[in-house]
Amino acid sequence: MSDTSPSPQAPIPVQDTPRRRFSRRAAIVTLVAGIATGIGFKTLADAGFAGWSHTGPPGAPLDPARLDEHVDRMLRHLYVEIDATDAQKGQLAPIVKAAAADLLPLHAKIHDTRRQAVELLSQASVDRAALENLRDEKIKLVEQGSRRLTQALADVADVLTPEQKRQLAEHVGRWRRRHG
């Protein structure tokens, strides 16, 4: 009787092709972007941008002094999660605080466009041109905020080590599962 079992073969080495390198880089960039986005949204949520918060009901004006307190509190939690060094703490705080301060006026403007839209829609006849202009204005504000947030997230990602980015990604994943 002959032995029909296959003989063990050495694994075929995977070639490092340009496509494989691109895929690996794309995965790393996606991970970093996800981490940075998580940091940004967490900062904004703690600062009162996501519904009811420590600053009052949704749509209430945000006080810059209270915003700074909330950003400090969020940063203290972040530092513990990623085991940040003193040097990193010194780099991260100005990045996050500057972004939050830059985004605060945009938040107020976006809420103002919402109020204007309600006024336009509650009139006897709907001014479609005015609604379209308001929509364009809001899109520009959101684009401006998105650009600023992306800049801050990239700056934060530059400060963190790969291990810290991994830890933060895990933390953001747990936070998202709990909070939807």
Image (tube, grey):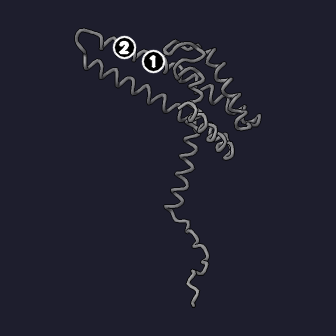
Residue that badge 2 annotates: 116
Relative to 27, say whether 112 is above or below.
Answer: above
Residue that badge 1 annotates: 109
Q: Which mark is residue 21?
A: none
Q: Residues within 10 Å of mark 2 (few under 14, many from 20)?
A: some
- Residue 78 at what x, y percent from top left? 68, 32
- Residue 165 at what x, y percent from top left? 64, 43
Q: Which image quarter: residue 9?
A: bottom right
Residue lying at 35% horizontally and 16% vertically, measured from the top left:
117
Relative to 55, say whether 30 is above or below.
Answer: below
Quarter holding the N terminus?
bottom right
Residue lying at 52% horizontally and 51% vertically, measured from the top left:
26
Q: Residue furthest front?
A: 1
Q: Considering only order in the chain, which callout, 2 or 1, is on the residue closer to the N terminus?
A: 1
Looking at the rendered structure, the secondary structure element under dot 2 is helix
Relative to 106, say whether 27 is above or below.
Answer: below
Looking at the rendered structure, the secondary structure element under dot 1 is helix
- Residue 151 at what x, y percent from top left? 55, 35
- Residue 48 at what x, y percent from top left? 56, 20
Residue 155 visible in image: no
Please state which of residues 11 and 148 is positioned toward the viewer in this rendering: 11
Please state which of residues 10 and 20 is positioned toward the viewer in this rendering: 10
Q: Residue furthest left?
A: 125
Q: Residues within 10 Å of mark 1 (few under 14, many from 20)?
A: some
**Amino acid residing under circle 1:** Lys
Please state which of residues 22 and 122 is positioned toward the viewer in this rendering: 122
**Amino acid residing under circle 2:** Gln
Alpha-carbon distance for marks 1 and 2?
10 Å
Q: Residue furthest top?
A: 124
Q: Which image quarter: residue 97?
A: top right
